[in-house]
Image (cartoon, grey):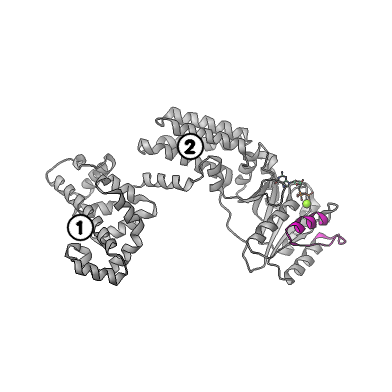
Amino acid sequence: MVLETLGRKLDQAIRRIRRLPKIDKDAINALIQDLQRALISSDVKVELVLEMTENIRKKGMNTELQRAKRKDFIIKLVHDELIATLGGQPAPIRIKSGKKNVILLVGIQGSGKTTTVGKLAKYYKGKGLKVAAITTDTWRPGAYEQLQQLTQQIDVECFGDPAEKNAVKIAVKQAKKALNEGFDLLIVDTAGRHKEEKELMEEMQKIERALKPNEVMLVIDGTLGQQAYSQAEVFSNTTKLGSIIVTKLDGTAKGGGALSACAATNAPIRFIGTGEKIEDLEPFDPTDFVGTLLGIPNIQGLIEKVQEAEATPDPEMIKRMMHGKFTLEDLYEQLKTFRKVGKFRNILSMMGGGNIPEALKEDAEKNIERWRVVLDSMTSLEKENPKIIKKSRKRRISIGSGTDYSTINRMLDQYNQMKKMMKNFLQLRKKGKGMGAMPGMNKQMAQLMGRLGKDFKF
Ligand SMILES: Nc1nc2c(ncn2[C@@H]2O[C@H](COP(=O)(O)OP(=O)(O)OP(=O)(O)O)[C@@H](O)[C@H]2O)c(=O)[nH]1
Ligand SMILES: [Mg+2]
C-alpha cells in the first residue's frame, strides 16, 4: 500500500473514534489532533491541515444528528475533507477509443516520465487501444533506447529518430507516421527539464502546439512532498496541464505532501506511480484512495448510511397521510424516491416500522420495478381504492403484467399496513393524544408531525 504510515495513523484514528461510547467535544478534539499529527508527518502543508481540521471541528460540533449516527457522520466528514485535501476532483476521461488521441508527458528531469510512458502504454493497451510510444527527447543520451527497451516488454511500437536533433520536428514527423499506421493513442515522451530552463520550456510549448494533445500530463516525483506545488505551478503557467501523475509514491514518507500539493493546483491527479516496474501504475480515484487510507474499503456503504440518517421525510407525503389520502400510486412514488438514497427503510422505521416485518421492507426495495408494471396494469379506481381488487382480478393483473401473483399480494399487503398505521395515527390525533402517543413512533418523527400539524392546521 502506498502512503502506508499515513494510512496506518488515519486508520488508528478512525478505530479510536469507532470504539468511543459517544462523540463529544473531547472526542472531536482528540480526533483532530490525531489527524493533524498524521498529515503533518506525511508532509502536508500545515496551513492545509489546519484548514481541514477546522472544517471538521465546525461541522462535527454543529450536527443535529442522533447520537447513534454521529459516529458515521464524523467519519464521513473526515473522509470528505481528506478527499478535498489529498485528491481534489476526479479526472474526467479524455481518451476515446477509435479516435486520434495524443498524451504528452512533461516534467522535471528524473521525475519518471520515460518510465511512465511505458506504464501508460501498458495500461491503455490493456484497455484495448492501439498504442504507440514516441520519444522526442534529444537531450538525454540513450533516451530512445530506454523507451524502446520498455515498450518491447509489452509489445508496443516505439517511434523516434535518434539522428534528428530538433525535438519539434521529431514530434510532428513521428506522430504523423504513427497515425498513418493506424495507431489511435500516441503517448509522447519529452526531455526532462529544470523549471528554470527557458529553452526546454519553449521547446515543450512548441511540441504542445504542434501535436495538440488531448491531454498534457505532468509527471511529478512524489518524494518531493509539498515542494511539488511550486513545480506544478511553473508547468501549469507554461502549458495547459490536463492532469498530474505522481510517481514514486512507494516508499516515501512525504506522499501526503505531494498529493495535497498537486490537489491544490486544481489539476486532477490521474495516476500514481507505485514502483519501478512497468505494471506499477494505478489510476487515481480520490474516493477509493481515501477509503483505503482510512481503512474503510466500502466507503459508499457508509455514505449511504449517513445520507439515510440525514434524510427527513417529505412533508408533502406526511400531509397527504394525515388527510388519510394515500393511494397505491402514492406509495409507489414515495418508495421510488426513498430508494434512491436508501431512505425508505429509515422512514418506515421512524414511523414505527417495527410493525412492518423486515421481510416486507426488503421486498419493497427489491421489487419496486415489478410494482411499476403491476400498477400500470391497474385502473385508476383500483389504485385509489385497492380494496375493490378481488381474487379473479388479481389473477388477470398477474397475467396482464407478467408478474407473480404473490408479488401483487405482497404489494397490497404493504399498502394495507401503511394505511392501517396512518388510520391509527389519525384516530389518536382526533382523540387529542400527543404526537408521541402512537406506539412505535420515534421522537424525530413525532417532532416532524408536530411541526407539520402547526404548519397545515390539521
Ligand atoms: N520507485 C519508483 N521509481 C520510479 C517510479 N517511476 C520512475 N521511477 C524511477 O525513477 C528514475 C527516473 O525515471 P525516468 O523514467 O528515467 O525519468 P524521466 O523523467 O524520464 O527522466 P529524464 O528523461 O532524465 O528527465 C528511474 O530509475 C525509474 O526507475 C516509481 O513510481 N517508483
Ligand atoms: Mg526520460
Q: Would you say residue 270 is visible in this rendering?
A: no
Judge left or right: residue 91 versus residue 72: right
Residue drawn at (57%, 57%) of the image:
92
Q: CA distance from mark 1 to mark 2?
A: 43 Å
- Between residues 425 and 230, which one lies in front from this camera angle? 425
- Alpha-carbon neighbours of circle 2 within 10 Å: few (<14), some, or many (≥20)? many
Is 311 left or right of 267, judged from the image as shown?
A: left
Q: Residue at x 72, y 69 (%)?
A: 179
Using a 10 Å C-alpha cutoff, classify the residue at mark 1 as few (fewer than 14 neighbours), some (14 to 19) or many (20 or more): some
Occupied quadrant, residue 395: bottom left
Disc 1 vs disc 2: which is toward the camera? Answer: 1
Secondary structure type for disc 1: loop
Give residue 408's position: percent from left, percent from top.
27, 62
Kindly identify the amino acid type of the residue bearing the numbered disc 1: Lys
Which residue is tagged 2? Answer: 56
Q: Which residue is mark 1?
A: 325
Q: Which residues are magenta?
A: 144-167
Q: Would you identify the image quadrant in which residue 334 lies?
A: bottom left
The magenta stretch spans residue 149: yes
Vertical position of residue 329 compared to residue 360: above or below: below
